[in-house]
Amino acid sequence: MEVQLSEIFIFKSHGLRYSKESLMVLDINTEFTKRLSEYWGLTYLESNEAEGNLCYAQNQNLRPGYRMVFSKLDILNYLDRQLKPGMYHIESDSVVFSKTMDGLNTD
């Protein structure tokens, strides 16, 4: 699934060019998380509560093929692996999301 950066991030209207680092601190668009949730067949968690989490399905160390949920941190980790250092035009540059969460492996 190819997605324009403007569909992923909520950006300031006065700037269209962002460094990779600047993109990674922007908020994620809710419509994008819904679309990615449907594409991956996983539930999106608004908050990423790792502390005191007893549910193994939400464990960040669980292999992607067994996960049932994903979070903003997962999206940012995926983007960190996909985007090269440099400048991006938020309305014309895009990222390709694979059908599975394999790109989220932290190994």
Image (cartoon, grey):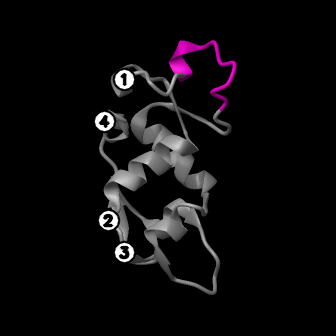
Give, as a single range, the part of the protein colored magenta: 49-58
**Residue that appears at 41% across and 76% down:** 88
The amino acid type of the residue labelled 4 equals: Asp
10 Å crowding of disc 1: few (<14), some (14-19), many (20+) = some
Look at the numbered disc 1 and give the secondary structure of its residue: loop
10 Å crowding of disc 2: few (<14), some (14-19), many (20+) = few
**Residue that appears at 35% across and 69% down:** 85
Q: Nearer the viewer, mark 4 or mark 2?
A: 2
Q: CA distance from mark 3 to mark 4?
A: 24 Å
Residue designated by label 2: 84
Q: CA distance from mark 3 to mark 1?
A: 30 Å
Residue designated by label 4: 102
Q: Earlier in the sequence, mark 4 or mark 1?
A: 1
Q: Earlier in the sequence, mark 3 or mark 4?
A: 3
Residue designated by label 1: 63
**Residue that appears at 40% across and 54% down:** 80
Q: Earlier in the sequence, mark 3 or mark 1?
A: 1
